[in-house]
């Protein structure tokens, strides 16, 4: 299996702009997760999909954040009206079936100036 | 109290020594436990998972789980400089779906 891929790897944007990140999970992994990680902290859960259904959302996911997985394959995470506090590494992970083992992609590092 | 706490680092051990990394969790209904390794500037890499009390060994790594004490640890035998990284403990609770809750990580340095 190829691993989880994310695009772009780095994104620099100005405050107030919208950004969209893409995640392609490991093939045949039906579960997909988004996490956010800031320096010196562990990843924090944002949201989770099983196939195309978004089953969980963290309270961290404000109204400015939206995630989709339209065909149960790749997923997108959009942040509208970015703020400096959104600067972080956005990590995508996937897992298969009932397995709880989540495999992470390389992440997208967002810098909001 | 944090849901997942790891021993404060940084931890420094000489090459060839045993590195011991510890993690405690607050919710007794936690049922799945994971150790991830994260090199600086990289994403977390799954190295061990453990679900039942006792020890689980994989090469130089041993995970130990004690649910009664709400404690999980990772031992790295014959530590190598390439083991220098931040180690993240993650817990999945039965009541929180599939999300993982992570500790802040322990930075390990193995000195040649």
Image: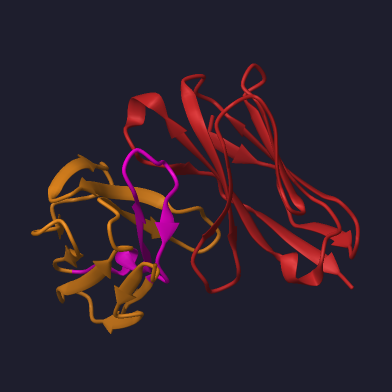
Q: How many marks?
A: 0
Image quadrant containing the C terminus of chain A: bottom left
Specify the quadrant of the image occupied by residue B82.
bottom right
Q: Position of residue A1 (x, y in %)?
A: 39, 67
Residue sitting at x 31%, y 43% = A97
Residue B99 is a magenta residue: no
Left or right of B88? Residue B91 is left
Is A95 above or below relative to A91? above
Residue sitting at x 49%, y 23% = B27
The orange-tinted chain is A
Colour applied to chain B? red
The residue sitting at the left extreme is A70
Q: Position of residue B57 (x, y in %)?
A: 71, 43
* A72 vs B75, nearest the viewer: A72
Residue A97 is a magenta residue: yes
Query: What colouring style does the render use?
Result: by chain
Specify the quadrant of the image occupied by residue A3.
bottom left
Q: Position of residue B74 (x, y in %)?
A: 71, 44
Q: Position of residue A79 (x, y in %)?
A: 18, 65
Specify the quadrant of the image occupied by residue A105.
bottom left
Residue sitting at x 22%, y 75% = A15
Left or right of B9? Residue B47 is left
Q: Which residues are magenta?
A: A82-107
Is A55 above or below relative to A73? above
Is A97 above or below relative to A110? above
The residue sitting at the top extreme is B68
Residue sitting at x 26%, y 67% = A23
């Amino acid at each position: 299996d190829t691993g989880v891929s994310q695009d772009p790897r780095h994104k620099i944007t100005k405050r107030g702009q919208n950004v969209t990140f893409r995640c392609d999970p490991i093939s045949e992994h039906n579960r997909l997760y988004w996490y956010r990680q800031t320096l010196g902290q562990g990843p924090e859960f944002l949201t989770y999909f099983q196939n195309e259904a978004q089953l969980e959302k963290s309270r961290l996911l404000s109204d400015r954040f939206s995630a989709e997985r339209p065909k149960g394959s790749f997923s997108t995470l959009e942040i509208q009206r970015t703020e400096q506090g959104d600067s972080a590494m956005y990590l995508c992970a996937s897992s298969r079936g009932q397995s709880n083992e989540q495999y992470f992609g390389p992440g997208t590092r967002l810098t909001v100036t | 109290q944090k849901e997942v706490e790891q021993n404060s680092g940084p931890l420094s051990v000489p090459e060839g020594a045993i590195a011991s990394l510890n993690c405690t969790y607050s919710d007794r209904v936690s049922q799945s436990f994971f150790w991830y390794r994260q090199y600086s500037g990289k994403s977390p890499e799954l190295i061990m998972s453990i679900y039942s009390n006792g020890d689980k060994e994989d090469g130089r790594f041993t995970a130990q789980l004690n649910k009664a004490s709400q404690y999980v640890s990772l031992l790295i035998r014959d530590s190598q400089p390439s083991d220098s990284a931040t180690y993240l403990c993650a817990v999945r609770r039965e009541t929180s779906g599939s999300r993982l809750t992570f500790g802040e990580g322990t930075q390990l340095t193995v000195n040649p």
